[in-house]
Amino acid sequence: MEEYLEVLNEKGEYTGKIETREKCHKEGLWHKAVAVFIINSKKQVLLQKRSKNKKLWPDMWDVTVGGHVQAGEFGFQTIIREVEEIGIELDKKDITFLGSSISHNVKSEHINNHFNEYYIVNKEIDETKLKLQNEEVSEVKWIDKEEIIEKIKDNYNGITDKQGCWEYLIRYYEWLEEN
């Protein structure tokens, strides 16, 4: 099924244009994406391992859930839709907005120009009971705060190199320590 995204200008403003995800990535058109970290009471973060068939970052550990904001959606709606990939149900009230950034990544023929939104969900989940969409995600696991921070600081060792994204997780952990 073809995904349609709202095209933004370089300031993040809506242009009134809607294009396919493929065209946005081929031509480097700006659009929105979201990332959410699910964190449990032990301050562990739930990571997903991307399917080996993914075009970008195949077989790499990644944020709990991420995705493109489709035309007509808000970020929280995208998250609610995307968590189905790992078999989790969320409600809008479960989701806390952290912040946003822009990113520019070029991987082979993909030009990702994203306005990213980052979110946190605090939730206890038994990862052994999750039903994964294998074409998207091969496995999930909880990882300790110290271990994920070490991976981020070690040039994204074993995880996707989505720079701004991981830095928001570190900032969130720092905020937790202060409050």
Image (spheres, rainbow, N blue to C red):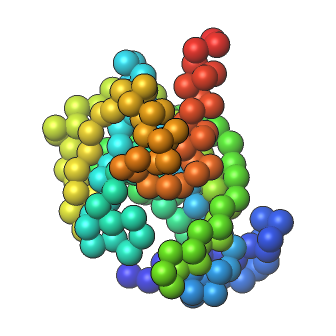
- The quarter of the displayed image where residue 103 is located: bottom right
The residue positioned 39% from the left and 19% from the top of the image is 41
Location of the N terminus (image quadrant): bottom left
User: Is residue 164 shown left or right of residue 148?
Assistant: right
Residue that sits furthest to the top in the current view: 179
Q: Nearer the viewer, residue 156 or 36?
A: 156
Residue 86 x, y percent position in the rendering: 29, 51
Number of residue marks: 0
Residue 148 x, y percent position in the rendering: 42, 35
Q: Nearer the viewer, residue 103 or 37?
A: 103
Residue 167 x, y percent position in the rendering: 60, 41
Q: Is residue 139 above or below residue 104?
A: above
The residue positioned 35% from the left and 38% from the top of the image is 46
The residue positioned 23% from the left and 32% from the top of the image is 126
User: Is residue 167 shown left or right of residue 54?
Assistant: right
Q: Is residue 119 visible?
A: no
Q: Is residue 174 above or below residue 143?
A: above
User: Is residue 52 shown left or right of residue 46?
Assistant: left
Q: Nearer the viewer, residue 116 or 173?
A: 173
User: Is residue 75 shown left or right of residue 30?
Assistant: left
Location of the C terminus (image quadrant): top right
- The quarter of the displayed image where residue 57 is located: bottom left
Residue that sits furthest to the front in the current view: 154
The residue positioned 61% from the left and 39% from the top of the image is 168
